[in-house]
Image (tube, rainbow, N blue to C red):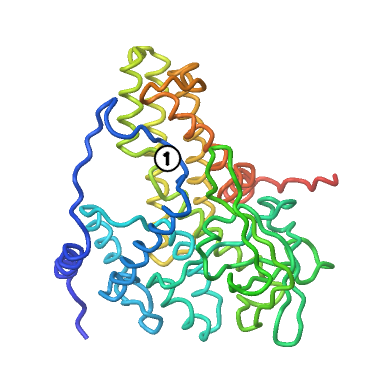
Amino acid sequence: MSIITEDDFRTEARAFLDEHAERRVEEKFSWGEGSDNVGLLEEKTPEEEAAEVVAAKQFKAAEFDAGFGWISGPEEYGGRALPTAYERAYRSVTTDYALPNQSVFVIGLGMVAPTILAHAIPEVKERYLRSLYRGDLVACQLFSEPVAGSDLAGIQTRAVRDGEEWIVTGQKVWTSGAQHSDIGEIITRTSPDKPKHKGLTMFVVDMHASGVEVRPLRQMTGGASFNEVFFEEVRIPDSHRLGDVDEGWGVALTTLMNERAAIGGGSGGMSDFSIARFTEMARHFGVADDPVIRQRLAQIYINGYVSRATSMRSMAKIKAGGLPGPEMSIGKLSLTKNMQLQAQTVGEILGPRLVADTGEWGTYAWAEMVLGVPGGRVAGGTDEIMRNIIGERVLGLPKEPPASR
């Protein structure tokens, strides 16, 4: 069978997008005009979120049915089995269009689906992968816990075998998108007598099952982008186990590396639009010629593009068939460090305008961004965890001694 040429593929993609989306209008930034919202996290009402999810699902279904939902995926699970270059070609075409917000699928397609593909039995792959990539199902990642935090080896959620089922009891926290999710990827402790990194097992859990409770967590920005999830004797079929019993740590690493690829694979927290906001803000408040501010702005710009280049190099390795590596931790750490520098620079430019709401455009609105930065240092693994990974796996330094020493 002859493969479609990349030029014909792009033509096909444009025809689909012309039918299902509007052409993007170039957005030019001008100080004092339009919205001054610069929050890092989406702060929407439940009604706004619900409407956005409906629109996202409708577009994702149309995209999948037209052959653009899983371009490089295996045909037996709904993919098109084209080279990854075609995925890049499709993404480049979509930049010309204003698509519905697809953030509800980021975790499911960027982290959970690759883990299912790598570690689930064929029946589970067939049951979920097609539906995930079509947008019929939404998935979340159930890793962090109140006591263990980012230390996945310290988790306490228990899974006890009962015949061909497992009974799960415990609590997860900081779960993005749990309120919209149909399934979740959960890590549990199945052998508490084994060392921390042993005795862990991963499962796919039905988020609508009896005993699952999702509660929103209010963050200091005012929104509720995250959740805590409680499991009270939730039954999971053994067929939904990912990998071998007590070997969940290796499965979790698959998810974590894909997670850091998704988080660290952007622009380093700095888009061209927000760069304009920074420079115009400095001009507006008369500090554009201040050498310290100029240096800070230059550093933010440089850091963003260096981070982007690092992540693009890592993603190229993955697309060439390699595995996600610790370089993703470098990209993620670079991202959060740049976000901290941005927050510091905003404070230096705005001064008290950042904490006192005078109603002036482009001032107090930045408080939401500053308050969101600490969340970025936790999401996808804390900065401290990232430094340990870089030190031990990249630099070859000795492992950090246990706290008991």
- SS at circle 1: loop
**Residue 204 or residue 35, whichever sits in front:** 35
Is 276 on the left or on the right of 136, as rendered?
Answer: left
Name which residue lies at 75% across and 87% down: 163
- Rendering coords of residue 383 (x, y %): 60, 42
Q: Quadrant of the C terminus?
A: top right
Q: Is residue 396 left or right of residue 365?
A: right
Answer with the quarter of the image where residue 272 lies.
top left
Which residue sits at x=52%, y=86%? 123
Q: Is residue 71 above or below residue 385?
A: below
Residue 254 seen in render: yes
Residue 92 in picture, x, y percent from top left? 24, 56
Position in image of residue 65 (x %, y %): 29, 76
Dividing the picture into quarters, in which one does residue 165 lie? bottom right
Query: Is 301 situated above or below 265?
Result: above
**Quarter where residue 54 is shown:** bottom left
Residue occupied by mark 1 = 269
The residue drawn where x is 25% and y is 32% is: 29
Using residue 210 as the reference point, say whether residue 20 is left or right of it: left
**Residue 204 in view of the camera:** no
